[in-house]
Amino acid sequence: MKKEIELTINGSPYRLSVEPDRTLLEVLREDLGLTGTKEGCASGECGACTVLLDGEPIRSCLILAVDVRGREVVTIEGVAENRTPHKIQKAFIDCGAIQCGFCTPGMILVGKALLEKHPKPGERQIREAISGNLCRCTGYAKIVEAIKAASRS
Amino acid sequence: MENIEYVEPKTVREACALLAKSENAKVLAGGASLVVLLKNKLIFPDQLVNLKTIAGLDRIDPSPEGELRIGALCRHRDIENSPVIQERCEILTQAALSIASPPIRNMGTIGGNICHAEPSADFPPALIALGATLKITGSKQSRTVPIAEFFSDYYENVLEPDEILTEIRIPPLPSFSGGSYLKLNKTTNSVAILGVGAVIGLDESGNCAYAGLGVGGAASTPLAITDAAMLVEKPITSSLIETVASAAVKRCEPISNVHATETYRKEMVGVLARRALTRALEKAERTTKES
């Protein structure tokens, strides 16, 4: 039986009607067309589905949409402001931290959450923060560099 | 999925009543384990009962008698960041930090980790080493169960259909105590192949006043290695530690799978038990020097 839920996504209020067994990831991608958040493994291990829930990184593939009722969700589509790239997005571009781009939304959101909590993170802290996001292309070095660079700008 | 109901009880009593009425309900805590089962069509609940809407199940409180009470809905992240847990039973901080990755730790709960009853779950060995008990509430009554008696089989526990785990209780440890949780896994964030938790408490003369040892991933359930009790009232030597480690190896019944063979698991139970006991002892001795 569908449940009516209200929540905030990328700063805007939404009212949705969803079946209880649908994940936040499914609702974001299929109902709302917010396809920046990716499905990689569907079991919480790869991090491609990472979104911010009340500012904290979580796995949207493992959370039911009904469970985020009344909360604030930020997806990659909500990172830039007024079409101006966030300093992290700019750093990723400038450092060459993007290859295929599949892990990038998750990495950027984790980086954003980290910098909001720890504005000057050390390398170890950055690596620990992104430890739940897999990248098959870059070898992580430039991603770490980009987050570091963003913290300095 | 056919007609699945979703409910948000406000009290434990309400939640237990819902579970008692339903044929086939599942409780929802963090969701990190449940949603995987749901999506892979391994379970077919007709009702999801969200426990997070019940206030007060995520507290961490010392009781007047010296017991530490941890709400079942505490997230791994809450355990990791808790100063009182770090001070009183730091082995739980270690276990929490070893689980998966930061985003999972923002979602998963200690109660879910215990009740999902994965043989290699990380909290059970540490809780066994601490001698923890579990407070369980049902629609008609509450009871307490020692953690070592909570697991009945792979992914099975002793909860009745209308019961919820509400609290984890850690008894007070001797003043000079130390704990070590060691996890064997293939990569930093992957699930444990084996997990060993050891806690040692010393009295003022440096003799052992308490010893606990738990092993996960080496049988169909987490194991309590009760042989650790042989350390009590003695000065702990490396030879005694070796005896307990060998006893742990004898008690385990590991499987062979793609991650590790039975032989390797047995060997590593001995290695990790020896290391964990040694480190727990070192930490306990360090606290005697600090005082």
Image (cartoon, coloured by chain):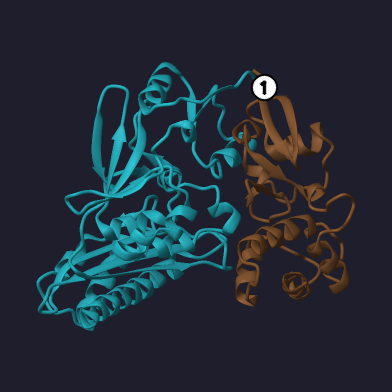
Chain colours: A brown, B cyan
Where in the figure is residue A69, as x and y percent of width and height?
Answer: 62, 32
Mark 1 — residue? Answer: A4
Where in the figure is residue A147, as x and y percent of width and height?
Answer: 74, 69
Where in the figure is residue B51, as x and y percent of width and height?
Answer: 46, 33
**Residue under mark 1: which chain is it in?**
A
Q: Is residue A64 above or below residue B131?
A: above
Position of A106 compared to B182: left or right?
A: right
Instruction: Check the picture and name the quadrant holding the N terminus of chain B.
Output: top right
Rendering quarter of residue B58: top left
* Circle 1: element type: strand
Position of B153 compared to A145: left or right?
A: left
Where in the figure is residue B136, as x and y percent of width and height?
Answer: 30, 36
Instruction: Check the picture and name the quadrant holding the C terminus of chain B.
Output: bottom left
Camera-side residue of A70 and A100: A70
Rendering quarter of residue B115: top left
Q: Is residue B40 visible?
A: no
Q: Amino acid at mark 1?
A: Glu
> For the point 74% across and 72% down, which residue is it?
A140
Q: Is residue B76 visible?
A: yes
Few, some or many residues within 10 Å of mark 1 (<14, 14–19, 20+): few
